[in-house]
Amino acid sequence: MSSNVYFMDARSDSADTSLIAKTTTVFDAAGLDKLISPGDVVAIKLHCGEWNSSAYLRPVYARAIADRVKELGGRPFVCDTTTLTYSPFSTRATELDLLLTAERNGYSSAVLGCPFIVADGYVGTSDYRVDIPEGYLLKEAYVAQAIAAADVLIALTHFKGHGMGVIGGALKNLGIGAQSKRGKFNVHMGGHPKYGVGAAVKFDESFVVDKEKDIEWELIEEACPIGLFKIREDNTIAWDRDKCMTCLGCLGVMNPRGIFQPNQMLFDATDIAIADAALGVVKTVPKVGFVTLAIDVSPKCDCAGFSDMPIVPNLGVFASTDPVAIDQACVDAVTASPGIPGSLSEEMGVEAAGERKFDLAGAAIEGLSEQTTINTAVVNGLGSRDYVLHHVEPVGREKFRFPFDERPTRKRFARMFEKFQPFPFDRHNGHGYNRLPEVDIEAVKPHDGPTVGTHSHAAYHGDGTSHGPNGHSAPENQWHPGEEGTHSHSTTHEH
Amino acid sequence: MARAQDMLDEAIVLLTNAGQNKLADRLTAQREKFFFTSLAGVPLANKVKKAGSELSADGSESNIAAVEALVVQIEDKADAPGTVLT
């Protein structure tokens, strides 16, 4: 059976076609407004971005959803969850760090109009365990407490690529993002006898830590939060791999040095588990809706401490009650789109419209599939890959007026301007400002530079010197405003 | 064999044939690292392959410098801690 996905593209020429307006328009079109009853506590789950990432969703999208929830009588909060330890320099692994990162990225109650919550607590152990016998690989999931306790969950997702998940969509927003840290260990195959890091990666036991050459050698010994690495007296590395919980704290240290060779099974199994854990969330929260913005589609996730150029142009905003259908719709839209010249989609040779983009431009290793999580979510019954895409029309500008003062201009400003007139009518015969009556407008329009000379007082370098023609100090006989009108001779400028 | 390693191998052959054995050796030293066994190294591997091709056609100082600049970038990135996977 097909699911319904509602869509508005990324073009805009009016208030009601702004992406912010479109976000709430598709929210209503998909019937997500009907999910919210007066008094409902509504968790708006998003990714607040890692420190120094820049493609994550601007907070205003969450604000718009939160405002809409409040209009409907709900009590919204916006949330994210603590991450695994992710390499040596993660920035969201505890509530303290996550809040610092979130605020730097603009996520605070002042901006959102509602609280910003770390949904799984200080260390990430606040959660709710749910059985998922339908799961393809996982049979239980650990849903972040604040999300599990909510009456409604709105997954507000930034669609992008991901090194391990291949795509970062709605399913991953639930299957990783809505899991507690304990739940993330589960999804990343922590302790799994076949797929976990401890079982799956190839470990080079002969690797010698050269403390003279590798100034970061201490990162190796201290890469594990439970101390499973030891540098022996002969400078080889001992690893108590049977106890590895797959926190991924070491991968960023071990992979680049070749101490680990990651096994593709770990990645594939995690992508499968994401779908099962997402099912656990949907089974836990009574009502769940999905809004996904396919904009700033960076090849790597917002959990990276950087954001590469988007691989495709901004596509638009989607909404649905089916996380599988909405992810498939986003993947299809990215596939159909041409890649952006100069982006990773071009460097990977998948820039043509119709090419699958994320298998190469999103994944960290070759052989992963952007369909693995989606297909698993079909198998576990979470949703459908088949969908009907409804193109939603704008609902009119009236709804998106500035809400705090909707009076017409004179009523808003007349009394204020009587007291504090900002226009200086008393100067220059009522014209207000010192300006020339006329200039040669055409002279400054040529694409190869102006056809009038540089002003003798121009222009001011930071060091206080004037550049004048050809980068030298201006000669005495240059033109001054009001002295002799405009000049029309041409000057060659070197840039 | 990984996509990035393929490209890197082509670059290494080009550099060796052009008599740039030291540069080729520096690339060979990076070959087995995750950067090149994963997809992360594809863009730089491709760039050094192209630069190696230009160098094999014209062994000018500027072309040697272009390859060396890429080798330095590769050495820096291939060893950088903090590869994000998730």
Image (spheres, coloured by chain):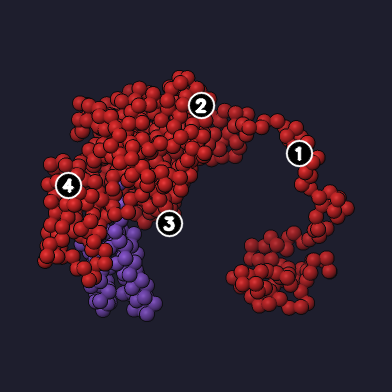
Which residue appears at 78% of the width and 77% of the height? A477
For mark 3, give the secondary structure.
Answer: loop
Real-space Cα separation, disc 1 to disc 2, in angstroms: 32 Å
Residue at numbered disc 1: A416
Q: Mark 2 — on which chain does it sit?
A: A
Residue at numbered disc 2: A70
Image-based side of A316 in relation to A384, left or right: right
User: Viewer-proximal residue, A100 or A153?
Assistant: A100
Do circles 3 and 4 both sit on a common chain? yes
The reply to whether discs 2 and 4 touch (Cβ–Cβ < 8 Å) is no
Do circles 1 and 2 both sit on a common chain? yes
For mark 1, give the secondary structure.
Answer: helix
Residue at numbered disc 4: A244
Above or below, A171 relative to A52:
above
Q: Mark 3 — on which chain does it sit?
A: A
Image-based side of B60 in relation to A453, left or right: left
Q: Which mark is residue A342?
A: 3
- As drawn, the chain in purple is B
Real-space Cα separation, disc 2 to disc 3, in angstroms: 42 Å
- Tell us which disc is closer to us: 1 or 3: 1
The N terminus of chain A lies in which quarter of the figure? Answer: top left
Do circles 2 and 4 both sit on a common chain? yes
Above or below, A237 relative to A431:
below
Q: Residues within 10 Å of mark 1 (few under 14, many from 20)?
A: few
Residue A75 image point, x, y percent: 46, 26
